[in-house]
Image: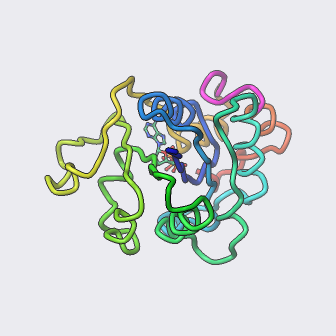
């Protein structure tokens, strides 16, 4: 059985995330994709991150109705910074050795994977599946790493959580950039409306 793991800050989750998860599921024949919102992301200390419960709830709302998508609170349950190598190890152990794990990443993430904790150990436990992203050149991947990565064919989606936060902060529309249920949640909870949120 093949399973996809998709980690992210998801602050907020947007259509770019959903589209690449679906592309990965379809092209690799994944039984399911498990979305894993991060606890305290090791790479994003420079801004205030929305509380874990809100990011978890937005992810739950976004994937609702897709029987192949699941939510895990594994990382948000940890106080300390979450490292992907530990998360993948956790799923390898709990899902069983016969499961083939695929790690879904955007181009920006794979280009910085060498800065992550124990990249070799990480790559020995799962196969990265990478979606292109406007502004990030996958041609810059080291040839050795390129061989171990599966690159998804498909549309490039020029949407980021940063852009969505700044749209909300300046009162612009985020309609169609996030599922309607997520847009309602953001508006009800008044997320991203403060100046320090981007
Ligand atoms: P931010 O703008 O806050 O940095 P983000 O939009 O990059 O957020 P994350 O939650 O950090 O969203 O992303 C989780 C994963 O999804 C990362 O591997 C990232 O590369 C990937 N990703 C996010 N948006 C896209 C996109 N539009 N196309 C391809 N990959 C994406």
Read off the magenta span. Answer: 174-181
Q: Farthest bottom residue? A: 80
**Rendering quarter of residue 94:** bottom right
Classify 59 as above or below 115.
above
Q: Position of residue 152 (x, y in %)?
A: 35, 33
Q: Farthest right residue? A: 188
| Left or right, 134 with reference to 179 | left
Q: As rendered, which of 99 and 7 lies closer to the eye?
A: 99
| Left or right, 134 with reference to 20 | left
| 177 falls in the magenta region | yes
Q: As rendered, which of 108 and 67 lies closer to the eye?
A: 67
**Rendering quarter of residue 137:** top left
Classify 4 as above or below 24.
below
Classify 22 as above or below 57.
above
Q: Is the magenta stretch mostly helix, strand or loop?
A: loop
| 58 falls in the magenta region | no
């Amino acid at each position: 059985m093949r399973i996809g793991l998709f980690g992210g800050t998801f602050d907020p989750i947007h259509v770019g995330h959903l589209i690449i998860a679906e592309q990965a599921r379809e092209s690799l024949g994944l039984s399911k994709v498990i979305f894993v919102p991060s606890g305290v992301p090791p790479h994003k200390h420079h801004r205030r991150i929305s509380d874990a419960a809100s990011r978890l709830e937005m992810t739950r709302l976004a994937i609702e109705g897709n029987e192949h998508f699941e939510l895990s609170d594994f990382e948000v349950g940890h106080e300390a910074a979450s490292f992907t190598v530990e998360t993948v190890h956790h799923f390898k152990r709990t899902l069983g050795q016969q499961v083939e794990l695929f790690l879904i990443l955007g181009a920006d993430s794979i280009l910085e994977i060498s800065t992550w904790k124990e990249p070799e150990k990480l790559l020995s436990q799962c196969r990265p599946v990478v979606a292109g992203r406007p502004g990030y050149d996958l041609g810059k991947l080291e040839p050795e790493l390129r061989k171990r990565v599966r690159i998804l064919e498909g549309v490039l989606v020029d949407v980021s959580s940063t852009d969505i936060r700044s749209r909300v902060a300046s009162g612009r529309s985020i309609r169609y950039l996030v599922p309607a249920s997520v847009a309602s949640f953001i508006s009800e909870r008044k997320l991203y409306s403060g100046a320090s949120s981007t």
